[in-house]
Structure formats: structure tokens, C-alpha cells
Amino acid sequence: MRGMDCNAFWDLISGAKKECGQDMDAAFQWLMGRLTILGPQQAQDFHDILHGYQDLANQYGLWSAAALMCENGCSDDGFIDFRAWLIAQGKEVYLAALADPDSLADVEAYGGCQFEELTYVGNKALETMTGQSAYDGTDAAAYNLLLEELRRDIVYGEGINYPYEWDEIAGRFPRLCAKYLKPGTAEFMLEHNKTMWFQGNKDIQKAREGGPPKRPSPRTHLEMGGM
């Protein structure tokens, strides 16, 4: 039985953000201290919940948005670190980003939008206390059930798992593009046949079938039930 639920997890994330702000090294140490006080089971649970939220955020559409925000693009490992950084911003920001990645235009970017150390804090705390690895301690069947539980709070937005290309990002992420994309960048990339994704990848090809979904039009007052 787990000793930590998702609410307790988000409380720790919120506490680290409140106490340490944008200092990621301090946040890591603050979480290490808290998890060490809470004990081995809590450290294991924190590790599993964190990785669960990272896995649930593994969406192409969010990756496209991350490529705009990160200072030097976003590699495979970089996207793992970006998702940790996103979680560190708190539950509200995390859920909003999965509903609409363009909402991240309202979030201050810092630290290259990557927080690699957060991925390992539960494991580090458990190793410090017991010498054991949280990765080895994760039960596969229990982890799948955990994913189902965490998934209940998430509302994925339209196109969240579509890998957007240079000629598509402005239409999907207008605010992020206005904030982070240098003028002429998309045009330069298109002119020189540079793509955001490896188009020979069969998973990318499948995800791009049918083209990008349209952004939903804002609902009118009458459509929302107004008079």
C-alpha cells in the first residue's frame, strides 16, 4: 500500500516551489530533506508518482511546445528534463499545459526549462536511507494502476499528441511563438528543408496522418448558455 497519494505529492512540489522559487538546486535539497524525514516508503511513492506524471506528459504536442521554450531545442533526454521542470511548476500549470501547451506562454521560463535532478530525487532519498534503488523497487503492475489513477485528473487537449512542424507551430502555439520564436526562423527552416521531427520515423508518420487538428474556436456567450 502506498504511503503517499497524488495530493501529498503535489503538496511537496508546491512546498519546494514556495520555499525555493526558481533555485532548482535548493528545491532538490529541500525535497531530499522532506523525503528523508517522511521515510523510505514515501520516497519510493514520490519517485513512482513523479515518473507517472512524466510518462503521462510524454505527448508530441507538448514536445513541440517544449522545443520553442528550451534554449537549444529539445532532444529526447531534454524532453524528459522538460517534463520534470513542468511538474516542478505545480499541478495547475502541469494540467493546463496538457490541456493547451500554449498556456505555457504565461509561465516564466528559467533554467533552460529543464530540471534533470528532480527526476532522481526520490531515488536519491531512498538510496540515502536504505542503499536501495527506487527504480528496482517500482512494481510494474502497481505502476500501471498508478498511471490509471493519475490519468483521471488529466484532460488532454486537441492535438496534444500531434508532432507539429515548422509550418504548423504558429497556428497551434501563437503565444509561445510570439514569445520565443525569432522572426524568420520557421521560414528559414522550411527553406532549407530542416524539420522538427525525423520524418522517416514510422511513429511520427502515423501521428501526423491527417494533418494538424484545428484549434477550437472560442465559444460564444450564447453557446456557453448565456442570455
Image (cartoon, rainbow, N blue to C red):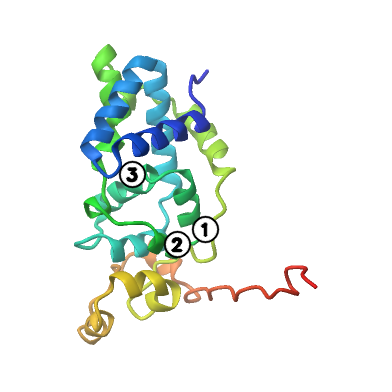
Quadrant of the frame with the C terminus: bottom right
Question: Is residue 199 something one can see in this rendering?
Answer: no
Judged by depth in the image, the label closer to the viewer, 2 or 1, is: 2
Dot 1: what SS?
A: helix
The amino acid pointed to by label 1 is Ala
Position in image of residue 102 (x %, y %) = 43, 65
Classify residue 112 by image quadrant. Answer: bottom left
The amino acid pointed to by label 2 is Ser
Position in image of residue 145 (x %, y %) = 54, 32
**Residue contact between numbered discs 3 and 1, judged by CB atoms under 8 Å:** no
Instruction: Decide: is 108 above or below 134.
Output: below
Q: Is residue 14 left or right of residue 131?
A: right
Residue at image position (25%, 53%) is 110
Residue at image position (61%, 74%) is 218
Dot 2: what SS?
A: helix
- Front residue of this view, candidates 72 and 105: 105
Mark 3: give few (<14), some (14-19) or many (20+) Cα within 10 Å.
many
Mark 2: give few (<14), some (14-19) or many (20+) Cα within 10 Å.
some
Mark closest to the chain's N terminus, 3 or 1: 3
Cα separation between marks 2 and 3: 17 Å
The residue at which mark 2 appears reads as 103
Find residue 99 and name its label.
1
Q: Is residue 227 left or right of residue 93?
A: right
Q: How many marks?
A: 3
Residue at image position (36%, 81%) is 167
Position in image of residue 3 (x %, y %) = 49, 19
Cα separation between marks 2 and 1: 9 Å
Dot 3: what SS?
A: helix
The residue at which mark 3 appears reads as 84
**Residue contact between numbered discs 2 and 1, judged by CB atoms under 8 Å:** yes
Position in image of residue 23 (x %, y %) = 24, 41
